[in-house]
Amino acid sequence: MARIAPGNTPKFAYILLVIIASLFLYLDIQYKTFTPTKNLFNSGLLTSNLLVKSIIFNPIGNIYNVTRSKIDLVNTNTSLLNELELSRIENFLILNKDELFKNQNGLLSFIKSSSIKNSYELAKISSFDTNLYKCCDSHRLFLFNNTKPFQNGGTVINSQGILGQIASSNKRVSEVILLSDINHSIPIKSNEFFCNASGTGRPKVIECRYDKSLWPEYLSEGESFYTSGLGGVFPEGIYIGSVTYINTNNESEIILEIESKADPLIQNHVMVIYPDDFK
Amino acid sequence: MTLNNFIKILVSILIGVYLDSRINFYASDYYLSFTLGFLIFCFWAFSLPNNLYALSSFCIGLIIDLILGCPFGLNALLLTISSYLIHSYRYSFRIFSFLQITIFFALLSSFYLGFINLFMNTANFSYLLIMFSFLLNGLTWIFIYLLMNNLKKRFYRQ
């Protein structure tokens, strides 16, 4: 039988680097020490990506379009698509104006008011790691800032409903934590039933856990849930989604799985809104 | 190892990582997850045992962490440990058959995937995904080995 031949792998360097890597990992998970570094790297990557696109790829693409005399058509098409996306979001706002702007005289007066710049902003998605969205617990997307960074806590919606809220911002981009992110929680209600729904780490799925003895009434699949407005971050009465599965395996606890209506994969533009009492 | 060779190795691994993120978006629906970037790293550590040591593995891991937005140090830790394992067995590989080597790297990639999921997908950790991916990455290793051997002969100069 063959013996394993002795190697001369230098163990010290490996042990030292494993300790350093573990330390990095601990600091990042526990204290988020490297988050600014990662954000800086991300924004640098995005900027260089944009520069490369605008300097190299777009001119090449444009030459092709010019030779086909279609450049105007392509631009018009792109702007129309953008307009369509924005109007979809605005339609959503108009449809939900009673819930969104309960304390003012409808959307028009709201838009005309001086607080418009602080309360309603359109934004373009700068990057969204769809692989991470489908595989892992962390569901984040990044928005390009407009003239200034978005305020933390702003509600992010698209034409289908609430996607999440602004978690952090730097000079160039703002990070949005989605409803399905495992660290996110949103107060929701269905008729008289209130609960805090937390993200599950699965796309579009959030869950409500409650004690059976505290709420004996039966909730059925298909039941609709809306934002409750408690906490003051999300506006009240916006449709979130409906119950798709009720887990009653645990004797004391019931878990409602709610599929959110809003899909972050469908649009490149979103809207950031701030509730009336947002400071 | 020269800087030129390090860049070649890094670029090949980053291409693998990029393809991972593209393919896994669809593959995760079927409880499958590719680890192309990791397998390419394993190939380089396996075929150049005297060149790709601890520090290079650590640096490559940190770069992957930055690009993927993983917890900082996770890939650095896993790649350094994997590099150590591969180096410890580098003489034993000479008496291993290709099937044994394939099983070794499929196991290693399953551990890698398991640890990544342990940190990044705690709520929905799936053993099924690890099992299926073991088979998938075994098959992928064969493909990577043949492809990278070819590329190594063409582009890599000692």
Image: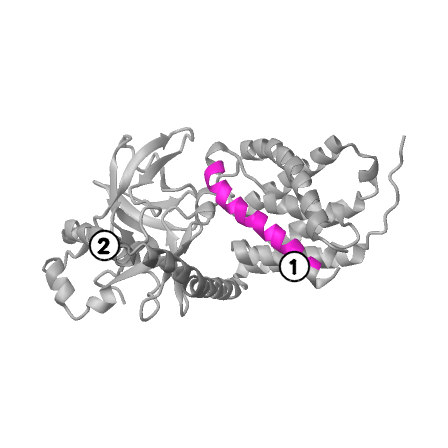
Task: Identify the residue at image location x=52%, y=61%.
Answer: A32
Residue A223 percent coordinates (x, y): 25, 34
Q: From the image, which quarter does the C terminus of chain B lie in?
A: bottom right
- Local secondary structure at mark 2: helix
Q: Position of residue B72 (x, y in %)?
A: 57, 57
Q: Position of residue B78 (x, y in %)?
A: 65, 49
* Three-letter code for the amino acid on which mark 2 is drawn: Leu
Q: Is residue A224 magenta?
A: no
In the picture as drawn, the residue positioned furthest to the front comes out as A67
What residue is drawn where x is 70% and y is 58%? B5
Q: Which mark is residue B7?
A: 1
Quarter of the rendering containing residue A134: top left
* Quadrant of the rendered image containing residue A247: top left
Instruction: Name the chain under label 2.
Output: A
Q: Residue at x 30, y 45 (%)?
A: A262
Q: Nearer the viewer, residue A20 or B131?
A: B131
- Front residue (pair A227, B19): B19
Q: Which residue is mark 2?
A: A80
**SS label for mark 1:** helix
Residue segment shown in magenta = B5-27
